[in-house]
Image (tube, rainbow, N blue to C red):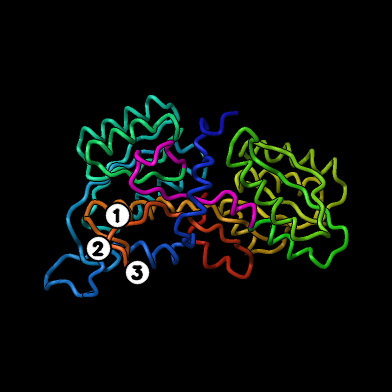
Amino acid sequence: MDRTRKGLPATGEDAARTSRRGLLLGAAAVSTGTLLTGCTSNDSTTESPAGQDRTASGEASGKAVTIGFAGPQADHGWLNAINDQAKKRARTYTDVTLEITEGSNDTAAQIGQIETLINKKVDVLVVLPADGKALTQVGLKAMRAGIPVVNLDRIFNSPQAYRCWIGGDNYGMGLNAGTYIGEQLKGRRDARVIELAGLDNLELTKQRTQGFDDALKNYPNIKKVARQTADFTVESGQAKMAQLLQAQPAFDALWNHDDDQGVGALRAVEQAGRDDFLMVGGAGALSAFQAIKRDNGVLKATVLYPPTMAASAIDLARALGQGQGVGGLAEYEIPTSVTLYSAVVDKDNVDRYLSTGFS
């Protein structure tokens, strides 16, 4: 099954390189709010003139900005959260008008939607492409028309097609998941772990697995004994996890790449009556946060791939439209790339992240 057709988050090798050179930001609203919500000029004056309108966040309103938002079809929990985050963030600004497209996983349809936004002469575009490579030309078209583009998550092939890229860190997801599991098992001899991955024809899956494997190299007592791929759905997670449980009667930990397929994986675990291992998920679904908070099952943590990046993309787009920099930084321009940090959420910090969980 084609994951871009399903509208799931994906980045390529360029995104991995971007993540290494990009600005590292925390994933929670608390973190992004500190740096990005105040996408304002670097003037140290904080008071606005008497009678000036203020945004819902208390910030002084600025030049009116129309932001065009185009993403794939929201047929996955994470993508639906992307749309919600963008809409909610735009509503916090009295000086922002959001023009949002219906969303499509058909490349030609999404190109048409973006061209419509270009023809409407929006001030800034935020684009999460169904296929970064295929939509590079329309990104270039917007930039050449004088409309700056915030490229969200799946990266265009050319840096000339966007002014700023913001997205997640797939390698970091795997690295942090592996490190968390390694720390939990470091006192155990001959520990065994398994991995429930995504689709191997996707670069993001390879990056997540590579990060996981690199982390485990630091724990010589741990051996990965099995790996199975699924396709990021509840049904596939349940079926593939059932196969893993049957093939592996004893293991100590599981890393599951995606919380949506994790819902199915947990069903398979419950049906098998297994509770002899710990599980780490991926992405940051509300159901995962709630299970972690209850702390009465195998799911002990999840590693974020935060949909809050869409809210931050709106912040960045507003700043571009108003010719401002990012609050808290000395530069007068927004950065070229922003890579979100893949935080590990467990029972100790889950309350902090509950509000960012997606359904």
Q: Helix or strand or loop: what does disc 3 sit on?
A: loop
Name the residue nearer the viewer: 289 or 18.
18
Residue 13: x %, y % from top left:
54, 41
Q: Residue at x 69, y 64 (%)?
A: 295
Q: Residue furthest left?
A: 50
Which residue bears the numbered disc 2? 55
- Assign the N terminus to one quadrant of the image: top right
- Of the residues shown, which amino acid type is indicated by label 1? Arg
Comparing marks 2 and 3, which lies closer to the viewer? 3
* Disc with the residue nearer the chain's start (1 vs 3): 1
Q: Quadrant of residue 149?
A: top left
Alpha carbon distance from label 1 to label 2 = 9 Å
Residue 330: x %, y % from top left:
32, 68
Name the residue nearer the viewer: 334 or 188.
334
Q: Residue at x 41, y 31 (%)?
A: 104
Q: Indicate whether 154 appears above or below 44.
A: above
Q: Quadrant of residue 292?
A: bottom right
Q: Helix or strand or loop: what does disc 2 sit on?
A: loop
Rate crowding at label 1 as few (under 14), some (14 to 19) or many (20 or more) other CA atoms within 10 Å: some
**Is the Cβ of the residue at disc 1 closer than 8 Å to that at disc 3?**
no
Rate crowding at label 2 as few (under 14), some (14 to 19) or many (20 or more) other CA atoms within 10 Å: some
Specify the segment rendered in magenta. Answer: 154-175
- Of the residues shown, which amino acid type is indicated by label 3? Gly
- Of the residues shown, which amino acid type is indicated by label 2? Thr
Which residue bears the numbered disc 1? 91
Residue 279: x %, y % from top left:
72, 55
Which residue bears the numbered disc 3? 328
